[in-house]
Image (cartoon, rainbow, N blue to C red):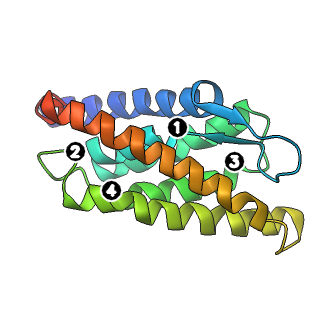
Amino acid sequence: MKNKTKLKGLVTAALFTALISVFTAFLLHIPVPVGSNTAYIHFGDAFVFLAASLLPLPFGIAASAIGGFLADVFCGGLVWAPYTLVIKALIALCFTAKSNKILCKRNYFAPILALIITVAGYYIAEAIIYGNWIAPMLSVVGNIIQIAGSSVIYILTSLALDKAEIKNII
């Protein structure tokens, strides 16, 4: 029985990895015009939040980190991929799957921590990539929009999934 549970977690994590990478790279993806250091804004982090809220910690971290990494690869942002791997893993740590509901008290506040990690993480990554600590300030607003939009999608989706009692199925 234990192997069946691990397999179910692995398969669900693989599904979330695919959802995160496809929604980030292609579906909830808004190119940013010239003048910004960010190539695009996306709302695929909503699936990072969901994966971390539904899956046991190691599976949620893996799905989030690998899905974000693959999205960067698909979009031609290979230079960002190692940073994304770490940042998305840290974001996943903010959420918990231990509650019987997706939107437990901790998960209501987790997007705020995700915002801090995203803004600080990509600011540092961009400063390292470009060798400039001033230019990354242009990306802060885009990162805030990205997490705010992802948070709204996450909360609305979670409300629906909690109403359907999806945690009892997964």
* Disc nearest the viewer among 1 and 4: 1
User: Which quadrant would the C terminus be assigned to in this image?
Assistant: top left
Counting other residues with Cα less than 10 Å from the Cα at mark 1, is it few (<14), some (14-19), or many (20 or more)? Answer: many
Estimate the x, y position of residue 132 in percent, counting from the top left.
87, 72
Residue pointed to by mark 3: 81
Where does label 4 land, which residue? 95
Which residue is tagged 1?
44
Residue at image position (66%, 58%) is 141
Q: CA distance from mark 2 to mark 1?
A: 17 Å
* Residue 135 as seen in the image, left or right of residue 2: right
Q: Is residue 81 above or below residue 166?
A: below
- Residue 23 x, y percent position in the rendering: 55, 29
Q: Earlier in the sequence, mark 4 or mark 2?
A: 4
Say what secondary structure mark 2 lies in.
loop
User: Which residue is depicted at the point 84% across and 67% down?
Assistant: 135
For this rendering, which residue is in front, 114 or 52? Answer: 114
Q: CA distance from mark 4 to mark 2?
A: 9 Å
* Residue type of the residue flagged with mark 3: Ala
Residue 3 makes an appearance in the image: no
- Quarter that holds the N terminus: top left
Q: Position of residue 2 (x, y in %)?
A: 15, 37
Number of other residues with Cα within 10 Å of mark 3, as a class: few under 14, some 14 to 19, many 20 or more? some
**Would residue 33 be found to the left or right of residue 147 on screen?**
right
**Where is mark 2, residue-wise?**
102
